[in-house]
Amino acid sequence: MRGYMKKIAVVSGKGGSGKTMVTTGLFKMLSKTENVTIADLDVECPDAGIYINNKKITDKITTSVFIPSFIKEKCTGCKKCETACNFKAISFFDDAITIFEELCKSCLRCVNVCKTGALTTRKIDYGEISVYDVKGRSFFEGQLRIGDIRTKNLINEVKKLSEKSENTYVLYDSPPGTTCPMVAAVSSVDLVILVAEDSLYGFNDFQLAFSVVRDMKLDYWVLINKYVPENSPVMKWCNENNVAVGGCIPFSDKIHSHYSKGNNILELSEVADCLEKAVSHITGGAQ
């Protein structure tokens, strides 16, 4: 019988806060003793694979959706399809319609309201999921087709695929920001690790991400990256609002240089000590 899989999403709000560093570091640390899967959900610009060594690709899966296709001879010009589309993906010009693939969400409401058969469906590819083996552990990487907007669709497909594994834990490297892609990444997870960059810009976006996580009533664990103890807007706010900070990684040129060269971030005690606290929290709360 399959056991329970604990799902952990690492988010940041601001891009460049250290989210991928934390996610891949946790993957390496958990891999030593646990069955763990990692999935890169930053499908518009995936980069977790840069920091995961010894990976071997085992599969590539193309993701597709159905969109409407127009048959002019059957169209009566009723414009019901244009009215039904909430995303302005269909527009009438003279006696024909134009379908904007980039705006279409594949809900197919337009096809359902068309009574003459002027709209049928056709399949298009919008992304790809690469599956890797990493010394017996699994790594899933989503890559959205250039120019496509179906970010949420691909995130959900990567999550679905990664959750089919038999592992105890799955780590999600979430997209930056606090819009639909981030919400899709954290939906239904057991724990959110909030990585806050200790700068005014990072602090602002941390507050936004924290609000989303709080409003979704998700469990969270705060990690401050690039921490400057003598002048920390994130720590000050957390103390004032009774938000517990689980760990801190100091602001350090040594860390930045080491990581940017693709070296194992766990070789630095300043990072490893903090991530050990995160691992303890993750495994201590496992069901």
Image (cartoon, rainbow, N blue to C red):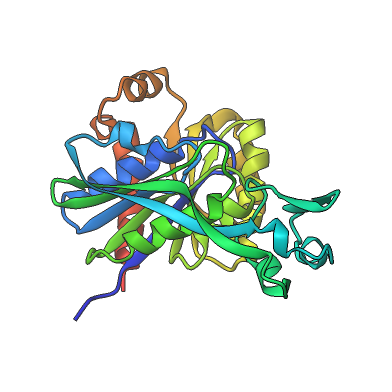
Q: Position of residue 234 (x, y in %)?
A: 60, 41
* Left or right side of 273 for 206: right
Q: How many marks?
A: 0
- Asked whether residue 222 appears in the rendered view, the answer is no
> Residue 126: image x %, image y %?
49, 48
Outermost residue on the left side: it is 135
Q: Quadrant of the C terminus?
A: bottom left
At a point 44% along the width and 62% down the height, the residue shown is 191
On the question of residue 59 being in view, the answer is yes
Identify the residue shown where x is 37% and y is 50%: 62
Seen in the picture, residue 235 relative to 2 is either above or below; the reply is above
Asked if 85 appears above or below 132 in the picture, the reply is below
Q: Is residue 179 left or right of residue 276?
A: right
Q: What residue sits 24% from the left and 75% below the top?
A: 3
Q: Quadrant of residue 75?
A: bottom right
Q: Position of residue 156 (x, y in %)?
A: 47, 60
Q: Quadrant of residue 14?
A: top right
Where is 130 relative to 287, above or below?
above
Name the residue rendered at 75%, 62% in the picture: 85
Give the side of residue 11 with respect to residue 262, left or right: right
Q: Nearer the viewer, residue 110 or 217?
A: 110
For the N terminus, give its image quadrant: bottom left
Q: Nearer the viewer, residue 46 or 229?
A: 46
Q: Position of residue 229 (x, y in %)?
A: 53, 32
Q: Residue furthest bottom?
A: 1
Closest to the observer, 105 or 276 = 105
In the depicted view, which residue is nearer to us: 251 or 86?
Answer: 86
